[in-house]
Image: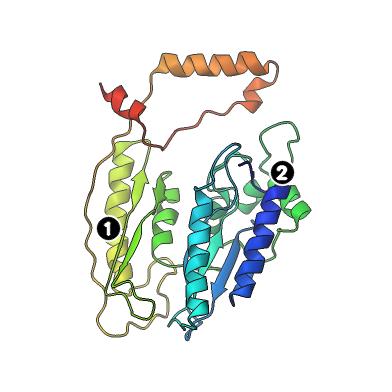
Amino acid sequence: MSRLALSDADKEARDWFVHTGKSLGCNITIDQMGNVFAVRPGRRNGFPPTCAGSHLDTQPTGGRYDGILGVCAGLEMIKVLHEHKIETHFPVGVVNWTNEEGARFPISMVASGVWAGEIPLEKAHNLKEVGGNRRTMKQELERIGYLGKKEASHHALPLALILHSHRLAVRYDALASTGIIHAKPGSTNTVAGRVQFSLDIRASKDDVLLDLEKQLKSDFDQIVKGNPMNGLNDGLEVIGRPCTLEWTLDAPSRAIKFDDDCISCVRQSAEDLLGAGSKERVQEMISGAGTASLESKIL
């Protein structure tokens, strides 16, 4: 599968997402970065929606079950609520972030970074694609009809708890992802008494990771109590007992610096392959992925 951000194939997927969201009773909002928010109204619509989601674009030759699964899972949630005519207390929704992987326009999480206030809109709009065409994000957003008028900002489009970890991770120049969510008892018409979710945070420096973990624990504690936190919970009235928070560390992951000679060989090979102007077309990136090479490097 190849569906690079803001390509014709990505437009088709976006059109499908918008059509599906509308058919399930969602209000569609597109911001200045082409982020698409499908929000299903609740009984109290003056509050930020709780959203799931990810991205519909892929890496150049992969990603069938990557971000796409996160978007489709969110739509499935909306579909179940819609088909069973369940009215939620607060609005819920699904978001499709633009160029989350950074595969075509070389800044990962660029659109969500603008939304979080960590990346200037002008910088993101002027970001040029990798490859020969060198078109900017703004040009391609305009071309496929997804340059929205809504401000790309968490102030204009606030969301709730799990996305706070992502926003804070961007501020720390780190990564955060949630891949597993369990709600108990798990019934469609029962308010969950316990929600458990995974949180994978990674950084290139161990001290940054520890600082991020400490800050997340502190912020999450305030959020679950209903206290205001960077725009979250503003104006929220806590009904009944507030939530409590338990934090369990499954496995730590140390930052590992790869061998300088190996990095140099890859860099030199890329420059030899691309020739003149290669320095403008080669980008060194820190991998946040956990692989066997990470463990073997420790040895």
Q: Quadrant of residue 269?
A: top right
Closer to us: 47 or 295: 295
Category of crowding for the residue at label 1, using alpha-carbon neighbours closer than 10 angstroms: few (below 14), some (14–19), many (at least 20): some
Residue 164, disc: none
Residue under numbered circle 1: 217
The image shows residue 213, relative to residue 23, as above or below, that is above
- Element assignment for label 2: loop
Find residue 198 and report its horizontal and vertical position in percent: 32, 55
Neighbour tally class for label 2: few under 14, some 14-19, many 20 plus, Cα within 10 Å: some
**Quadrant of the rendered structure where residue 290 is?**
top left
Give the camera-side residue of 182 and 45. 182
* Residue carrying label 2: 136
Do the CB atoms of the residues marked 1 and 2 lie less than 8 Å apart?
A: no
Left or right, residue 96 beside residue 226? right
Q: Quadrant of the N terminus?
A: top right
Residue type at the position of mark 2: Thr
Which amino acid type corresponds to the residue marked 1 in the rendered image?
Lys
Coordinates of residue 19 in the picture (x, y in percent) = 66, 67
The residue positioned 27% from the left and 65% from the top of the image is 221
Residue 32 visible in the picture: no
Write the residue at 65% across / 66% down.
18
